[in-house]
Amino acid sequence: MILTFIGNCQTIGLCYYFQQLLKNSNYDIYWVLYGDSFGYNKTTALWSSKCKNQILNYDKINDIISKSDIIIYQEIDLSKSVFSNENTLKKMVKKKCKLIKIPCVYLIYDDYDNSIKELIKREKKNNVDLKVSIIFDKYRNKNMMLIKDHPNTFLFLEIVKELCKLLKFDFFKKEQCDIFLQNKNYMGLPNK
């Protein structure tokens, strides 16, 4: 079974957590580069090294997408990504592939109300399967971002938990969550 993530640095983080969650399963878990506009460079993105099975070669990306059983992706404008959008993916994937669309999370706490409205607007516009705005609403008094576009460990785990519900996967045991939560930036994302 192949589980593939497509999107920005947020999906690299999610890919890592799923690699940990499903490491003793029959899933091969990949992250694929959505396009050159991401500006991804392994030498400057050392934080991403926790996530294994990163596919950066476009020929290999097409192959992985066509073989995937589950794809979790962010809707990326066609001008930035040939395949990280619903219409193109539906043409590329095998019939039984499950597509799960998640939002790009962007939130400014100094302008919380407007940021949440914008996030909700993007979630509706892109018709996402997982609404991160609901997580923000549930934990309104908790800061879940390192910077405006990098979630902290708590938010990553909440998103993983919601994805597990959608996929009918068991979530991490409390002990494993506690280990992750000891560091609010477990992924080591840039936070300035």
Image: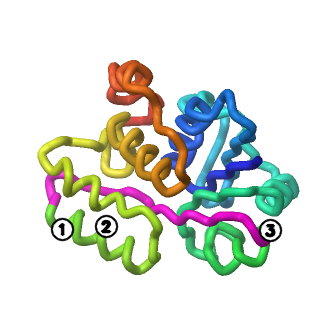
User: Which class describes the residues within 10 Å of circle 1: few (<14), some (14-19), or many (20+)?
Assistant: few
> How far is disc 3 from disc 2 in space, using C-alphas?
31 Å
Q: Which residue is mark 1?
A: 114
Q: Which residue is mark 3?
A: 94
The percent coordinates of residue 36 (x first, y second) are: 67, 58
Is residue 44 visible in the rendered image? The answer is no
Question: Bounds of the magenta span?
Answer: 95-112
Of badges 1 and 3, nearer the viewer stands 3
| Of pointers 1 and 2, the one earlier in the residue sequence | 1
Q: Are marks 1 and 3 in contact (CB under 8 Å)?
A: no
User: Label for residue 119?
Assistant: 2
* Residue displayed at 12% across by 45% down: 141
Q: Amino acid at mark 2?
A: Leu
| Of pointers 1 and 3, the one earlier in the residue sequence | 3
| Of pointers 3 and 2, the one earlier in the residue sequence | 3
> How far is disc 1 from disc 2 in space, using C-alphas?
9 Å
Q: Is residue 2 left or right of residue 109?
A: right
Q: Amino acid at mark 3?
A: Lys
Residue in front for this viewpoint, 5 or 158:
158
Quadrant of res 90: bottom right
> How far is disc 1 from disc 3 in space, using C-alphas?
39 Å
Of badges 3 and 2, nearer the viewer stands 3
* In magenta stretch: residue 102: yes
Is residue 34 visible in the rendered image? The answer is yes
